[in-house]
């Protein structure tokens, strides 16, 4: 059911209040989502800076001791720069593409115009004023007598006609305004949906790049062969070593000593 049907209420102010309250809360929600993404961008930026700072240290002091594991280490160490760059870009894009979009939307003229005073608000106030007069003179008829009865009836008739005129004005102008409210409400929900969807698409993009980066390191680790590393170490070390043959495993039996004089 559309807003022009649901909120074209008997008392105009009831329908206007219901929709405008929702839209004012919606504006606050938009601002809160923008604040959320601002904080998220800040976290990503701090994470990127923390990674860069932490990995300026030299964790491996003797890279030669790595042997053939140097290749996986180089891949792993290179991840830090790439990871910091990705999170830095993520932070910037959250700010520029998502937070900004949400903030800009609630600053549009459409928002400012529809949440301001309109002719329908004047109608709503006038309706309440005329309704109060009708109620007043309806009650007064029961209490007056003589010439005052005629005067009261005339007043009642006058305000009743004015009330009906106001109601007619509401029926004419109300639907158009309520339709604009409905369009604004739908547009802001679409904008909110787009913002969150864009964030998730961006986050997925970054995640896939991290997965690709991790895959390269994983491949390098998988190619590492511990036995080959040990064999290469032994081969290179043997150049400067004089090795002997290992014992063949036979028992060593001491020869009996020959006594003097035997």
Image (tube, rainbow, N blue to C red):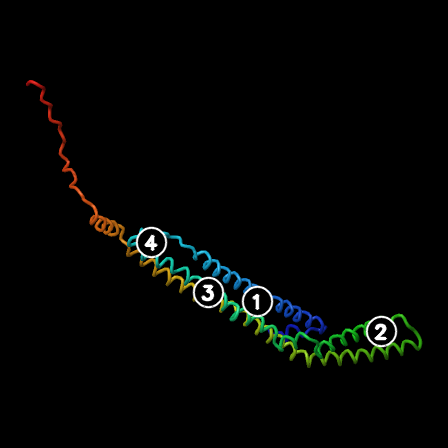
- The quadrant holding residue 134 is bottom right
Q: Residue at x 23, y 49 (%)?
A: 237
Place of residue 160 in the rendered image (x, y in percent of width and height, measured from the top left): 80, 78
Residue 24, disc: none
Q: Left or right: 143 with respect to 34?
A: right
Observer-side mark, 4 or 2, equals 4
Query: With respect to residue 186, does 46 lie above or below?
Result: above
In the rendered image, which residue does mark 4 sit on?
Answer: 63
Q: CA distance from mark 1 to mark 3?
A: 16 Å
Q: Along the polypeptide, which appears first: circle 1 or circle 2?
A: 1
Q: Residue at x 69, y 75 (%)?
A: 116
Q: Along the polypeptide, which appears first: circle 4 or circle 1?
A: 1
Pointers 3 and 4 in contact (C-beta within 8 Å): no
Q: Along the polypeptide, which appears first: circle 3 or circle 2?
A: 2
Query: With respect to residue 53, does 197 lie above or below?
Result: below
Q: Residue at x 41, y 59 (%)?
A: 80
Q: Residue at x 64, y 72 (%)?
A: 6
Q: Along the polypeptide, which appears first: circle 4 or circle 2?
A: 4
Place of residue 248 in the rendered image (x, y in percent of width and height, measured from the top left): 14, 38
Residue 203, disc: 3
In the rendered image, which residue does mark 2 sit on?
Answer: 137
Foreground residue among 158 and 88: 88
- The quadrant holding residue 52 is bottom left
Q: Left or right: 9 with respect to 143?
A: left
Foreground residue among 33 and 220: 220
Residue 34, disc: 1
Q: CA distance from mark 1 to mark 2?
A: 53 Å
Number of numbered discs visible in the structure rendering: 4
Pointers 1 and 2 in contact (C-beta within 8 Å): no
Pointers 3 and 2 in contact (C-beta within 8 Å): no
Q: CA distance from mark 3 to mark 2?
A: 66 Å
């Amino acid at each position: 059911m559309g807003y022009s049907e649901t909120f074209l209420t008997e008392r105009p102010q009831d329908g206007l209040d219901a929709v405008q309250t929702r839209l004012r809360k919606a504006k606050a929600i938009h601002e809160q989502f923008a604040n959320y993404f601002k904080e998220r961008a800040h976290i990503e930026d701090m994470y990127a800076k923390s990674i860069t700072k932490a990995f300026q240290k030299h964790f491996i002091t003797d890279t030669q001791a790595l042997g053939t594991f140097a290749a996986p280490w180089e891949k792993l160490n290179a991840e830090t720069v790439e990871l910091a760059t990705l999170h830095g870009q993520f932070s910037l894009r959250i700010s520029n593409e998502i937070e900004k979009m949400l903030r800009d939307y609630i600053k549009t003229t459409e928002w400012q115009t529809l949440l301001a005073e309109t002719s329908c608000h004047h109608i709503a106030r006038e309706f309440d004023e005329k309704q109060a007069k009708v109620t007043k003179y309806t009650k007064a008829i029961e209490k007056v007598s003589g010439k005052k009865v005629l005067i009261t009836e005339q007043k009642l008739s006058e305000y009743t006609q004015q009330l009906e005129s106001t109601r007619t004005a509401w029926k004419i102008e109300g639907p158009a305004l309520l339709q604009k409210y409905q369009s604004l409400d739908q547009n802001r929900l679409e904008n909110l949906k787009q913002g969150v969807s864009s964030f998730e698409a961006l986050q997925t993009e970054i995640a896939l790049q991290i997965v690709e980066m991790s895959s390269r390191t994983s491949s390098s680790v998988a190619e590492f062969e511990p036995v080959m590393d040990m064999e290469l170490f032994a081969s290179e070390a043997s150049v400067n070593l004089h090795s002997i043959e290992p014992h063949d495993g036979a028992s060593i039996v001491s020869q009996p000593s020959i006594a003097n004089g035997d």
